[in-house]
Amino acid sequence: MSGRLIDFLLQRSVRERMLLALLFAVGLPLLVIFAVLLPLKDGRDAALAENAEAVALNIWVRDRAAELDQIAQGPEQAATAPIGSSAIEESLIAAGLRPFVSELAVADQGVVELRFDQVKFTALADWMSANSRSWGYDISSFRFETTEESGKVSARLALTPAS
């Protein structure tokens, strides 16, 4: 093998040999850098970024767990009797949301079902936040769907009597 390489080099002029030496002296290190080292560095950077994201997620989850512990240790609220669909309707009227209610019904076991079509999301959220503790109901299910009109949603709520 080395004899063939020596024969190959002897057949070349001095200028060609110098160019081949330059090719191996510069080209081979560049090949190693671009083919091996840079992909390794990119992989390392990606792994470090994923690790940082995982650490941040872990911190966020621990913070939420600590908040949950604080909420669980908070004062117990006495269960209030359900206010009924008529009182819910009165609160809707007071909030100016009654025209947007397309369904207000009482189902089995006192479950109140509400459906809103094309209601302003912020108004609905404010009404729910202001009244949900005094209703005597738990929100057992809810669904919000965006509509074509900006800021408005279609919503369904099911309120189950608190136990």
Image (cartoon, rainbow, N blue to C red):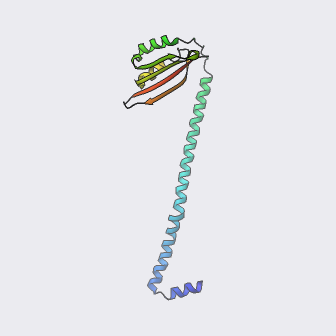
In the rendered structure, the answer to whether residue 87 lies left or right of residue 62 reads: left
Identified at 41% across, 22% down, the residue is 123
Identified at 55% across, 47% down, the residue is 50
| Labels in figure, total | 0
Residue lying furthest left: 149
Above or below residue 105? Residue 143 is below
- Residue 142 is situated, as x and y percent measured from the top left of the image, at 51, 25
In the rendered structure, the answer to whether residue 163 lies left or right of residue 16 reads: right
Observer-nearest residue: 9 or 1?
1
Above or below residue 92? Residue 9 is below
Quadrant of the snapshot with the C terminus:
top right
Q: Is residue 161 visible?
A: no
In the rendered structure, the answer to whether residue 150 lies left or right of residue 20 reads: left
Identified at 48% across, 72% down, the residue is 27
Above or below residue 32? Residue 124 is above
- Residue 137 is situated, as x and y percent measured from the top left of the image, at 55, 17
- Residue 32 is situated, as x and y percent measured from the top left of the image, at 53, 67
Observer-nearest residue: 154 or 13?
154
- Residue 96 is situated, as x and y percent measured from the top left of the image, at 39, 16
Q: Is residue 28 visible?
A: yes
Identified at 51% across, 72% down, the residue is 28
